[in-house]
Image (cartoon, rainbow, N blue to C red):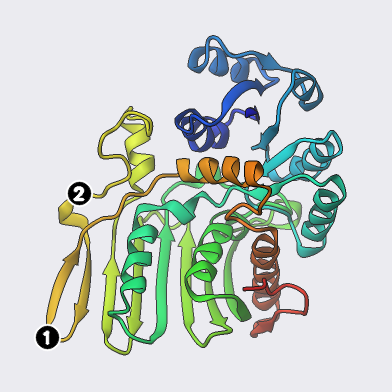
Amino acid sequence: MRIGLVGFGVGGRVFHLPYIQAATEWELVGVVARSPQRIAEVAAALPDTPVFASLDTLIDAGVDAVVITTPPETRRELVLCALERGVHVVADKPFAPDADTARELIAAAQRADRTLTVFQNRRWDTDLVTLRGVLASGRLGEVWRADFALEQDDRSVLEQGPEGGLLRDLGAHVVDQLTQLFGPVEQVDAHLDWVGAGDARVDVGFVLGLHHVGGVFSTVSASKAARREDRRMIVIGREGSYESHMRDVQVEQLAAGLHPATAPEWGVEREDRWGVLAVGDGREPVPSARGDYTEFYRDLHAAIADGREPSVRLAEALHTVAVLDAARESAVRGEGTGLGEGVLPRA
């Protein structure tokens, strides 16, 4: 199938392009870029790939799907345009600024009878894939609670404006991860760290407490302004605990010049950073599973070909946005906020 990339900032260049290239089921038709800097970057990275000035001209060239990686404030219009033109769409996260906009996009995909999905690539993070295996083994027994963190020392990539902020950025990822592991959320307790004022006010950190329908309680924190790095996944169950401090393996490999299509140990954490399972009377390292964001694009191709929903379902995307809405409301009100009806994904 033929696919086009709309936008060539950090998201398009680092988090999408290598994995589209690695998924040989797809042919990259072209990239939409406008600024001289972005056009030059496309030419350097993809010398034989056409650059288009607009989404419409890219679609006119003939594509089956497009990937919208532009800033959040432009995403709604571009997603709607692509669906109206009859192509399948991958929307970068955050999927929408609020649940009402998410419902609007879902309705548009249904009217167009085209696949719309969200790039929740961190479902294929090395540490998350490894944790899935631990939970599937049943060795932790009944899970009681979980503690996640994704702290990054990088203020430069914070999205500004009313549709920006860290909650809708990293928050969209970690909420999706936790709901994938422990099911939908029915109540949220939240605190946000704010900087600026008025239209320039933006959240640069958060702590969320998620009450899952199935009984698990999870907490997650993140910041890009605290001048610290911390990545952890701790899960506590009736039979013991699992703790992981793996790195952002795939991003580090890309920064080192490796590529998911050719690196033999892609997405595998080195042994000294493996997570530890503590059950019974002992503690044991858990070998790293292989994380690979390429699986998102392979799954998307198979879903379109088979006429089924992709792994990242729209009901799940809506639920994630609703959790983020509830988190913002909770932070403003200073108390827990329940989710309204119509935002719990079906099993």
First-in-chain label (1 vs 2): 2
**Quadrant hosting residue 96:** bottom right
Q: Is residue 88 visible?
A: yes
Q: Nearer the viewer, residue 20 or 38?
A: 20
Q: Dot 2 lies on which element?
A: loop
Kindly identify the amino acid type of the residue bearing the numbered disc 2. Answer: Arg
Identify the residue at the far left of this view.
Answer: 281
Kindly identify the amino acid type of the residue bearing the numbered disc 1. Answer: Asp
Residue labelled with disc 2: 270
* Mark 2 closeness class: few <14, some 14–19, many ≥20 residues within 10 Å: few
The vertical placement of 47 against 63, above or below, is above
Q: Nearer the viewer, residue 227 or 330?
A: 330
Quadrant housing the C terminus: bottom right
Q: Position of residue 259 (x, y in %)?
A: 36, 30
Instruction: Determine the residue positioned at 67% across, 73% down.
Output: 346
Identify the residue at the far top of this view.
Answer: 48
Number of marks: 2
Instruction: Determine the residue positioned at 63% across, 20% down.
Output: 29
What label sits on residue 281 in the rendered view?
1
Instruction: Determine the residue positioned at 82% across, 36% down.
Output: 86
Left or right: residue 307 compared with residue 123: right
Q: Dot 1 lies on which element?
A: loop
